[in-house]
Image (cartoon, rainbow, N blue to C red):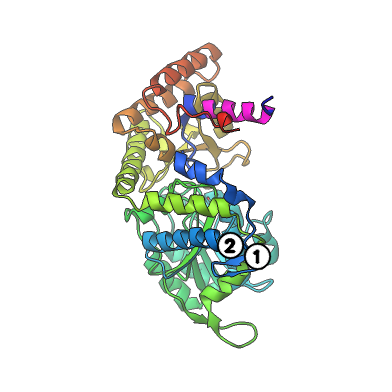
Amino acid sequence: MQDIVFQWIEAERRRQEEGLELIASENYASPSVLAALGSVLNNKYAEGLPGKRYYGGCEFVDEVERVAQERLKQLFGAVWVNVQPHSGAQANAAVLLTLLQLGDKMLSFELAHGGHLTHGSPLNSSGKLYTIRHYGVRPDTYRLDYDQIRDIAREFRPKVLMTGASSYPRDWDWATLRRIADEVGAYLVADIAHPAGLIASDLLNDPLPHVHVVTSTTHKTLRGPRGGIIMIGKDLEVPTASGKPRKLSALLESGLFPGIQGGPHMHSIAAKAVAFGEALQPSFRSYSQQVIRNAQTLARELQGLGYTVLTGGTDNHIVLIDLRNKGITGKAAEQGLEKAGITVNKNLIPYDPQPPLVSSGIRLGTPALTTRGFTEAEFQQVARWIDQALSHLSDEAYLLRLKEEIREFLKAYPLPYASVSVATLS
Ligand SMILES: Cc1ncc(COP(=O)(O)O)c(C=O)c1O
């Protein structure tokens, strides 16, 4: 008899197939990526690095990890990479453990303005182990204020200047940030978890030439398995607590393992290798271009329907909506949209008067629906559906009819594995 778990997996596959996926951090990985994830590489222990393992029998997984490393280097023009972080949070924790001592100072983007928990939230180890100050966005433009970052850095003298975000719809000026970091003697770290695929496609500013260390996830715009990576554009000799300088790459290597992780997940590394191979194809750049065009269309259309789009638009895959002029909270919007088969997440807007679990905004993202083949025309329709749902939040029957309309519409945009039930793999 089939394990009930596979019935829930099939139910989730159908949910993904039948609804509009607008969560900015999600995507549909290819069947090849899923096949690698579900492979026998799950069974293998391989602590260490290719050619330098603490376990026998690693000759094939060594090759897999080398392919992942080489493809990733090529994708971003990196001189050194590590493909072993289990996820984005682990990549960040390992980098901070490497660059900071207990109590050292880090300056990072305010969580409530778009930053990430792993950049110094008191609830995360980064906020417990290190001394944190934040920079934010300007209250008038909702954009980063590089003068403010410089002023705080001069006064606070951080050892790490952490950059990158979970919900910021604009590009980053890495060259200016490097000048600020150099002025105060800080390491500059860029967490590109969200826009990584767009950066790999050369559509946004490239941090690699400017920052000391880059971290990322592999499952958002990069469209791979859930996972993390660490990269550097230039391998420097850096001072250590013992006084003896060492290569930054060697320090990062041991910061991750044994610093915070044990055995690497070789099935994930294989899936990363497959995804990096896909991202190296010319079609991936076209996909990324479409992701941005779709986000800009969604922003423009929603503006036309009277919605407040933060910063007036977007440079990347994210559209942030301030719902206050509509008299709706982020929480009510998320719940109502879900009833209509539209998945989004409520989001704090900068200087939000509401608490995080209520919030005044929603965050929308285009990577997943672009993978399904949505272009500008479909995103005009998405904007109309969002508006229709938000205008009928208390009309359950209306929302259900909308859900049915969306389900019918999506039949013309099959998932990459629309006919494959993962449950049958059991
Ligand atoms: C900017 C940023 N960094 C790190 C992470 C953490 O990644 P993970 O959820 O894979 O640990 C996220 C995830 O949302 C993120 O947006």
In the image, the segment drawn in magenta is 4-14
Query: Which quarter of the rendering shows the N terminus?
Result: top right
* Residue of label 1: 55
Q: Is residue 101 above or below residue 241?
A: above
Q: Are marks 2 and 1 in contact (CB under 8 Å)?
A: yes
Above or below residue 209? Residue 338 is above
Q: Please name the residue that numbered disc 2 is placed on.
A: 58
Asked whether residue 399 is in view, the answer is yes
Residue 343 forms part of the magenta stretch: no
Q: Which quarter of the picture shows residue 211? A: bottom left
Q: Amino acid at mark 1?
A: Tyr
Rendered location of residue 240, percent (x, y): 60, 82
Crowding at dot 1, Cα within 10 Å, few <14 / some 14-19 / many 20+, comes out as few
Instruction: Give SS at disc 2.
Output: loop
**Which quarter of the figure is the C terminus placed in?**
top right
Q: Quadrant of residue 252?
A: bottom right
Q: Residue flagged by tag 2: what amino acid is it?
A: Cys
Q: Residue furthest bottom?
A: 243
